[in-house]
Amino acid sequence: TAAMNIKINKDESLPAAQRTKLAKVINFIGKRVLVHGWIHRLRLQKGKAFIVLRDGTEYIQVLLSGDLAEAYQTSTLTLESTIAVYGTVEKLPEGKTAPQGVELVADYYEIVGLAPSGDEAFTNKVQENADPSLLLDQRHLTLRGETLSSVMKVRASLLRSIRRVYDELSITEVTPPCMVQTQVEGGSTLFSLNYYGQDAYLTQSSQLYLETCLPALGDVYCIQESFRAEKSHTRRHLSEYTHIEAELSFLTFDDLLTHIETVIVKTIQYVLEDPISGPLVRQLHPEFVAPKLPFRRMEYIHALEWLNENGIKNEDGEEFKFGDDIAEAAERKMVDTLNVPILLTRFPVEIKSFYMKKCADDPRVTESVDVLMPTVGEITGGSMRIESLDELVAGFKREGINPEAYYWFIDQRKYGTSPHGGYGLGTERILAWLCKRFTVRDCSLYPRFTGRCRP
Ligand code: 4AD
């Protein structure tokens, strides 16, 4: 056809185009710009083509008309092709909608990389209702979707916000090692590795290292990957997750609880105030209610009473009794019913880790806390730590751990012990709660869980 022969040319008599990212085009209304991006949506009609362009910062509608719409190269365009567009930014007329309320009226464009059509077309690779495992194989492509990319932007904002909160509290960031020779949360979930012929593991938690930093740097935090060889497939367990951990000294258990709830509330406040992540959270989770201080405090023993009164059974299908673990389903039923954040405290010694300090008024329980949020349950675990050297060594014995590899951790008690405590926040769990995702897998860039280590 005639259209096939139309070639397009750049008009060099037009004013010079300012190069800009899509998030900044609204600063150029009435001006000529040059933008680059991926074709997110495409609608070709007679005499016009509407392209929604994406560059990761924003979306914008591009209008091709006249020769630009009729040109052969326009008929070859496919989703996810990259283009460079020259044009004028115009406010959309009343009653029309497009991203950012503007339209880029193109006067010229070039194809940078044409994506395939036919069998290899993007839409054939990433089908919305496809099997989750097929979608995970195509994670590098599904990431380009609006939902996943929005969650990743909220994630970036969450990490930025919590760093800001720690900075305001004068807590220093450190980077502990990921390759270690000690366990923190039980041997059954350790990933081992051959370290130049020695046994080593991928870290489960940086807690022990943070404790050793207290005398040198004061209160510290880290944002580091933790690794757990979790055997079970659940919607809130990953094999690798981003662990936000902090450790504070010379404080009481009650101070620790207040600190934890304050950090969570402030961080969420900053995420919601942010001009990018605030609107994204409201879009992903319209009914999200920001948590308020103070959180409801509940002792483990009273949680058991609540569960029994409400007919919720333990893992053996019986009434809860002291010493039982409150498993995921029961925990979530409780927090979903109460529908407020809960600081669940004072867990029994035998279901918690070797390093936890016992309560002075009841040595059967520990100064420990889990923060529970509606819809996901536990997002944070923390405690005060054993201060006494002898008691710590006894803790190792009880757990059948050889204390030799922990000499450096034990020294923390030997060379000037102090009351101290800390906690770990699961980044993906906070995001699942904040962005209303069914599973933490939707909150990780490339999720790792039982059987999945690619792409
Ligand atoms: O309760 P956990 O195991 O506590 C610790 O590791 C402590 N040493 C932290 C500390 O006191 N410094 O883990 C802390 C948090 C959990 O509340 C949860 O949010 C997250 O880490 N988490 C996981 N997230 C995703 N996948 C997993 N397999 C997780 N295991 C724990």
Image: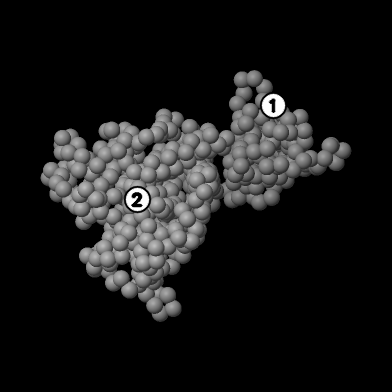
Q: Residues within 10 Å of mark 1 (few under 14, many from 20)?
A: some
Q: Is mark 2 within 8 Å of ligand 1?
A: yes
Q: Does dot 1 land on a helix, a strand or a loop?
A: strand
Residue located 24% across and 42% down the image: 299
Helix, strand or loop status at disc 2: strand
Pick whichever of labels 1 and 2 is earlier in the sequence: 1
Residue type at mark 2 is: Gly
* Viewer-closest of 130 and 208: 208
Packing grade of label 2 (10 A; few <14, some 14-19, many >=20) is many
Residue at the top extreme?
Answer: 94
The answer, for residue 446, to whether it is visible in the render is: no
Amino acid marked by disc 1: Lys
Residue 318 shows in this picture? yes
Q: Which residue is mark 1?
A: 91
Q: Is residue 222 above or below residue 409?
A: above
* Of marks 1 and 2, the one in the foreground: 2
Question: Percent x, y for residue 406?
Answer: 35, 69
Whether residues under marks 1 and 2 lie with C-beta atoms below 8 angstroms apart, the answer is no
Say whether residue 127 is left or right of residue 394: right
Pick the front one: 217 or 112: 217
159 horizontally vs 288: left or right: right
Q: Position of residue 167 (x, y in %)?
A: 53, 47
The residue drawn where x is 64% and y is 34% is 61
Q: Is 315 left, or right, of 404 in this rendering? A: left
Is 220 or 101 nearer to us in this picture?
Answer: 220
- Name which residue lies at 14% across and 46% down: 321
Is the CB of the residue bearing disc 1 within 8 angstroms of ligand 1? no
- On residue 382, the disc is 2
Residue 260, position as x, y percentages in the image: 40, 44
Q: Quadrant of residue 411?
A: bottom left
On the image, the x and y values in percent for residue 319 come to: 13, 43
Q: Name the residue at the right extreme.
A: 13
